[in-house]
Amino acid sequence: MWPSPSLLAEVTDAICQGLLAGATAVALMFPASVNSGPESDLNRRGMPGTGRMQTVAPSARFADFGDFLPSSEARHVADWVADSADNAGADFILIDKKYARVLVFDAQARLRATSAVLLGGAQGDDTVPGIGSRPLDQVRPEERTTPAGRFVGERGHNARGEDVVWVDYDAAVSMHRVLATHPKERRLERLASESVQDRRISWGCINVPVAFFEAHISPLFAAHRAIIYVLPEVKVPAEVFGSYDVRSKHAVAAASWHWPSAAVGNPRSQANTPFNATSTRRSTS
């Protein structure tokens, strides 16, 4: 005898409910995809057509210049500092010698301020050995260079008792307020000039407008150290700093992603240079 239609409907409904419950349990026990979860969303990328996964290369980091248009070399060095963390978490300054300009950045490589400056009257990226101990009248015109390099800037005082920021203490090169003690040099007028050549007049020191020094340089070094990168004008930045082009480096990294990626590199370690807040020495001008 065949069951009634109502009994068949009840049996069918029970079977369907049982299958649904079983499918749900299986789905909970065995996730549908190994790609699920925040880690795979952020750290991995699928390889089209292979079903394999690949580690995503680290994101490049760049300096933030805001609305200011820097020179190509200033951008190169600032981007490298941002990407490599060469500033070791400290604020930093760029001196763009080719354009006689100072650029002040915070620790995250964001430009705070910029200004024209006066630099050494002679072109060159090196200093003459022992020049810091010579009297000024014994420094020849061709020796009045502002040295290129990476320096740990520190507060101090020159022989006149003026507070300065030492760039290269041994070479007596500092960053200080513009000096107008010799009217014939017309340093204030030179600072206002659009000509870079007009701004090459000092004995090697970096002369900064007084208002800019008070607003941006002095406070920066008041409580902690900062890094000063003096860009070269004869050599190339990579030769002086060991810098690299950030976009090119990360393009190569992206092309060489691999699976699996078991090792994680250690962040670059920067040795701290001792800070001396009471250094006193003759400063060139």
Image: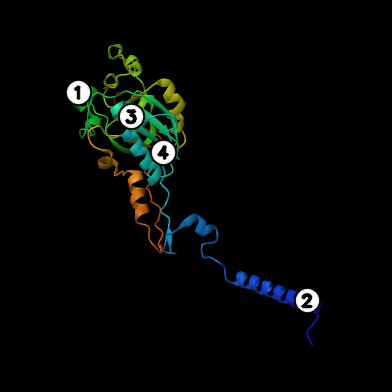
Decide which of tag 2 and tag 1 comes sooner along the chain: 2
Tag nearer the camera, 2 or 1: 2
Amino acid found under the numbered disc labelled 4: Ala
**Residue marked by disc 2:** 10
Tag nearer the camera, 4 or 1: 4
Q: Nearer the viewer, residue 137 or 51?
A: 51
Q: Is residue 251 above or below residue 184?
A: below
**Residue marked by disc 3:** 174
Give how far apart the Cα atoms at labels 4 and 2 are.
70 Å
The residue most toward the front is 1
Neighbor class of circle 1 (other Cα within 10 Å; few <14, some 14-19, many 20+) is some
Q: Is residue 144 above or below residue 59?
A: above
Q: Quadrant of residue 80?
A: top left
Decide which of tag 4 and tag 3 comes sooner along the chain: 4
**Residue marked by disc 4:** 63
In the picture, which quadrant includes the N terminus? Answer: bottom right
Q: Please give the name of the residue rendered at 41% of the width and 32% of the height, measured from the top-left corner.
A: 104
